C-alpha cells in the first residue's frame, strides 16, 4: 500500500513537471519565435543578424550557410510561397557596407592579392551563401539629404559621420566641419583656391572661348580619376559638362560617399588590373590632380587604359609634382612619362605652372608611322576594346575604327544636339536612325507617365541622383534632360553592349551584373528605374530577394523605385513591401502605353524613412 501511494505520487509529480515544462516551451517559442520573426526596424543589434550574416562577419565558420531559403519569383503555389514577415536589420557597424568592396570579406576569404597592383581595391563579391540577408540601417541621426544645388556645397555631418578628411586636407580646402554640416569650399590638392578658377585656367590654357571648358559643346563627358570629394566634377556641371568621378575606397575613405551625398556623379573604382567599366572612346577629357597613380608601372598599362577610354583628339590634364618639380626623382618620372606618351602619339597641347595637358591623336596616322617594334604595340585586331566586365588590362594601344580614322574624330554633334542625334556607332548594333528616334520618343512618353505617377509625392528638387538599371540606348536618361537630375546608366554585362551609345549621346554610365552588388555606398540614389531587371535576374537563376535587398541598400530613405516588368514580378515585389518598409505609390498597366508589352506593368514604390533605436527622426 505504501509503495503504491508512493508510485502514484511520483507519477503525479512527473506529469506536473511535464505540463509545466510544456507550457514553458510553448511560451518561449511564442515569445522568441515571434520576436525573431517580426523584429522591428526600430530595434537592432547583434541579434538582428541571421546566422548567415554572423558567419560572414567572421563568426561561426561551421554554420550551415546553405540553409537559407531564397525567395523565388514564381507564384505557382499561390499563398503558400515563402513570404518573410520581416527582414532583420544588419548591425549598425555595417551602415556603410559595400558587399563587393568589403575588406572584412577579403581578409576572411584569405585572397592572395597583389597590393602593389591595387587588387585589394577591385571587386571581390561574396558567394551567394555568404551574402547578408538583412536591411542596412542608416547611421544614428540620419536626415533627409540637403537638396541640390545647395548640396554641392554642404551636407549633413550625421549622414556621413567622417571628418578625418577635413583634418587631413585642412590646408587644401577639401571640406570643413561647421556645426551640424560639412562644407565643401571647392578646393583640391592642386586647386586650393577653388575648382572653378582651376577649371577656367585649364580652358584658358587650351584657348577655349570665354575660358569655358565645354569648348562650345565639343567637350561633354569627362573622366576624373582619383577625384577626392569630386569638387572638380561638381563645378563642371554648371558648364554643361558631366564627369565620371572615380576613386577607390582607400585610406581616404568615404570620398565617393561624400560626392554622391553632394549630388555629384561618382563611382567606386580603381585603376588596378581590370579594365575600367567603360567602353572605348567614352570621354573627351580626362583629369588627374595629384591622383597618386604610378603611370609608368607595367610598361605604362594604366596610361594605356586611359588612352582606351579617350575619344580621338581627347585631352589628359595632369596636375602633379612630376609636371613642374625640379628634384631628381620628379625629373626622372617626367622624362620617362614624356617618352612614353610620345611613343603613344600624344602631344603636349599646353603646359603651365603645375599642369600639363596632353592630346590624343585624331586618327591612326601617327600609329602607322612609328618604327617597327616600337613599344607599346598596337592591340591585336581580335582585342575588343569595348569588352570590360572582368577583362584584364593590356599594355597596348587601341587603334581607331576605320570610320573614326577616316573622319579624324568621333563624328559626334556638339552638346546638347548630340543627345538626340543618332550616333555613328549605332551601326555596330544594326540599329537604324529611325529605330533610335522611335526609342527616344517612346521613353519620352514613358517618363511623362512616370512623372504623373510621382507628382503627388515629389517637387522640382526632390530627386537628384537617379539610376537606370537597364539603360539600353539611354533614352530614359535623355528624356530627363530638363529635370535637375543626373543619371547613372547601367548596361548589363551579358546584354548588347550599348553603353558606347549612352556615352556617344553625352551621358554617363557603367557596366554591371545585377546578380551582384553595385559598387556604391548605401543610400546614394534617389530613384532607381528597373525595366525588366527582375525578369532578367530570374532567367539567370539569381535571387529575387537579394536583388530587392540590394536595391534597398543603394536607395536613399524616402527614395523611389520604378519597376517596369511582368505581372508576376510585380506580385513578387508586393509580397515584400512591408518587409522592406516600402509603400506603393501607384501603378499602370499596358493599356496606357501602346508600345508596352501586353503583360508589362509599371509599379512605383517609395522607401520609408525608418530609423534605428537611438536615432532621431529629423528632416529639413
Image (cartoon, helix red, strand yellow):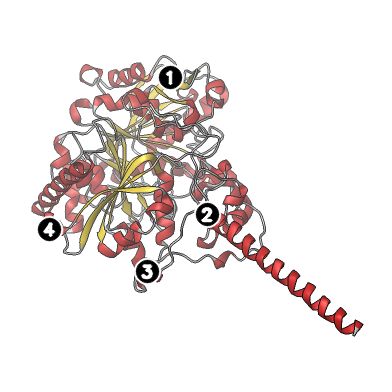
The residue wearing badge 4 is 591
> Is residue 187 depicted above or below 340 in this figure?
above
Q: Residue 99: x, y in percent?
A: 50, 50
User: 10 Å neighbourhood of mark 2: few (<14), some, or many (≥20)?
Assistant: many
Which quadrant is the N terminus positioned in? bottom right
Given contact means CB atoms under 8 Å apart, are the residues at marks 2 and 1 in contact?
Answer: no
Question: Which numbered tag is attached to residue 187?
Answer: 1
> Is residue 502 depicted above or below 207 in this figure?
below
Asked whether residue 586 appears in the rendered view, the answer is yes
Q: Residue at x 53, y 58 (%)?
A: 37
Discs 3/4, front: 3
Question: Which picture quadrant has residue 5?
Answer: bottom right
Discs 3/1, front: 3
Asked whether residue 51 appears in the rendered view, the answer is no
Given contact means CB atoms under 8 Å apart, are the residues at marks 3 and 2 in contact?
Answer: no
User: 10 Å neighbourhood of mark 4: few (<14), some, or many (≥20)?
Assistant: few
N-terminal-most mark, 3 or 1? 3
Which quadrant is the C terminus positioned in? top left
Q: Residue at x 53, y 65 (%)?
A: 68
Q: CA distance from mark 3 to mark 2?
A: 26 Å
- Label 2 sits on a secondary structure element that is loop
N-terminal-most mark, 3 or 4? 3
N-terminal-most mark, 3 or 2? 3
**Left-right relation of 23 to 362:** right
Q: Residue furthest right?
A: 2
Closer to the camera, 280 or 336?
280
Q: CA distance from mark 1 to mark 4?
A: 52 Å
The residue wearing badge 3 is 79
Question: Which picture quadrant has residue 484?
Answer: top left
Discs 4/2, front: 4
Discs 3/2, front: 3
Amino acid at each position: 500500500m505504501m509503495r503504491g501511494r508512493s508510485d502514484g505520487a511520483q507519477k503525479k509529480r512527473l506529469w506536473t513537471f511535464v505540463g509545466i515544462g510544456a507550457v514553458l516551451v510553448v511560451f518561449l517559442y511564442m515569445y522568441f519565435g515571434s520576436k525573431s520573426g517580426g523584429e522591428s526596424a526600430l530595434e537592432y543589434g547583434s541579434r538582428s543578424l541571421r546566422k548567415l550574416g554572423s558567419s560572414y562577419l567572421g563568426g561561426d565558420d561551421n554554420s550551415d550557410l546553405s540553409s537559407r531559403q531564397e525567395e523565388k519569383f514564381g507564384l505557382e503555389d499561390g499563398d503558400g510561397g515563402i513570404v518573410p514577415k520581416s527582414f532583420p536589420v544588419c548591425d549598425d557597424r555595417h551602415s556603410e557596407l559595400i558587399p563587393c568592396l568589403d575588406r572584412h570579406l577579403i581578409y576572411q576569404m584569405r585572397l592572395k592579392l597583389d597590393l602593389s597592383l591595387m587588387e585589394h581595391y577591385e571587386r571581390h563579391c561574396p558567394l551567394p551563401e555568404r551574402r547578408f540577408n538583412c536591411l542596412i540601417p542608416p547611421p544614428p541621426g540620419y536626415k533627409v539629404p540637403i537638396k541640390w544645388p545647395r548640396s554641392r556645397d554642404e551636407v549633413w555631418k550625421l549622414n556621413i559621420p567622417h571628418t578625418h578628411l577635413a583634418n587631413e586636407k585642412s590646408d587644401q580646402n577639401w571640406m570643413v566641419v561647421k556645426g551640424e554640416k560639412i562644407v565643401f569650399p571647392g578646393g583640391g590638392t592642386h586647386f586650393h583656391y577653388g575648382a572653378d578658377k582651376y577649371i577656367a585656367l585649364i580652358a584658358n590654357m587650351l584657348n577655349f572661348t570665354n575660358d569655358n571648358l565645354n569648348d562650345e559643346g565639343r567637350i561633354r563627358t569627362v573622366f576624373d580619376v582619383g577625384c577626392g570629394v569630386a569638387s572638380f566634377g561638381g563645378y563642371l556641371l554648371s558648364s554643361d559638362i558631366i564627369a565620371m568621378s572615380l576613386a577607390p575606397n582607400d585610406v581616404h575613405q568615404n570620398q565617393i560617399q561624400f560626392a554622391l551625398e553632394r549630388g555629384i556623379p561618382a563611382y567606386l573604382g580603381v585603376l588596378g588590373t581590370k579594365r575600367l567599366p567603360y567602353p572605348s572612346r567614352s570621354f573627351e577629357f580626362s583629369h588627374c590632380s595629384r591622383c597618386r597613380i604610378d603611370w609608368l608601372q607595367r610598361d605604362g598599362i594604366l596610361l594605356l587604359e586611359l588612352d582606351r577610354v579617350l575619344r580621338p583628339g581627347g585631352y589628359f590634364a595632369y596636375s602633379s609634382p612630376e609636371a613642374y618639380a625640379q628634384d631628381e626623382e620628379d625629373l626622372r618620372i617626367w622624362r620617362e612619362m614624356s617618352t612614353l606618351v610620345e611613343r603613344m602619339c600624344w602631344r603636349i597641347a599646353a603646359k603651365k605652372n603645375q599642369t600639363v595637358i596632353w592630346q590624343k591623336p585624331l586618327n591612326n596616322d601617327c600609329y602607322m608611322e612609328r618604327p617597327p617594334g616600337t613599344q607599346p604595340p598596337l592591340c591585336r585586331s581580335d582585342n575588343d576594346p569595348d569588352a570590360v566586365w572582368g577583362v584584364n588590362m593590356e599594355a597596348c594601344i587601341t587603334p581607331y575604327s576605320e570610320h573614326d580614322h577616316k573622319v579624324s574624330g568621333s563624328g559626334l554633334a556638339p552638346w546638347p544636339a548630340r543627345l538626340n542625334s543618332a550616333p555613328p556607332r549605332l551601326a555596330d548594333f544594326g540599329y537604324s536612325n529611325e529605330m533610335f528616334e522611335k526609342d527616344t520618343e517612346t521613353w519620352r512618353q514613358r517618363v511623362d507617365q512616370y512623372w504623373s505617377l510621382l507628382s503627388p509625392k515629389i517637387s522640382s528638387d526632390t530627386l537628384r541622383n537617379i539610376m537606370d538599371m537597364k539603360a539600353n540606348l539611354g533614352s530614359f536618361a535623355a528624356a530627363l534632360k530638363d529635370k535637375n537630375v543626373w543619371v547613372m546608366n547601367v548596361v548589363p554585362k551579358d546584354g548588347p553592349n550599348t553603353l558606347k551609345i549612352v556615352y556617344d549621346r553625352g551621358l554617363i554610365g557603367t557596366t554591371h551584373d545585377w546578380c551582384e552588388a553595385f559598387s556604391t555606398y548605401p543610400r546614394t540614389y534617389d530613384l532607381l528605374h528597373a525595366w525588366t531587371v527582375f525578369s532578367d535576374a530570374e532567367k539567370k537563376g539569381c535571387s529575387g530577394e537579394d536583388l530587392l535587398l540590394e536595391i534597398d541598400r543603394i536607395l536613399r530613405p524616402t527614395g523611389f523605385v520604378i519597376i517596369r516588368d511582368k505581372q508576376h514580378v510585380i506580385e513578387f515585389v508586393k509580397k515584400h513591401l512591408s518587409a522592406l518598409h516600402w509603400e506603393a505609390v501607384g501603378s499602370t498597366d499596358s493599356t496606357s502605353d501602346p508600345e508596352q508589352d501586353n503583360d508589362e506593368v509599371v509599379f512605383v514604390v517609395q522607401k520609408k524613412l525608418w530609423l534605428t533605436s537611438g536615432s532621431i527622426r529629423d528632416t529639413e
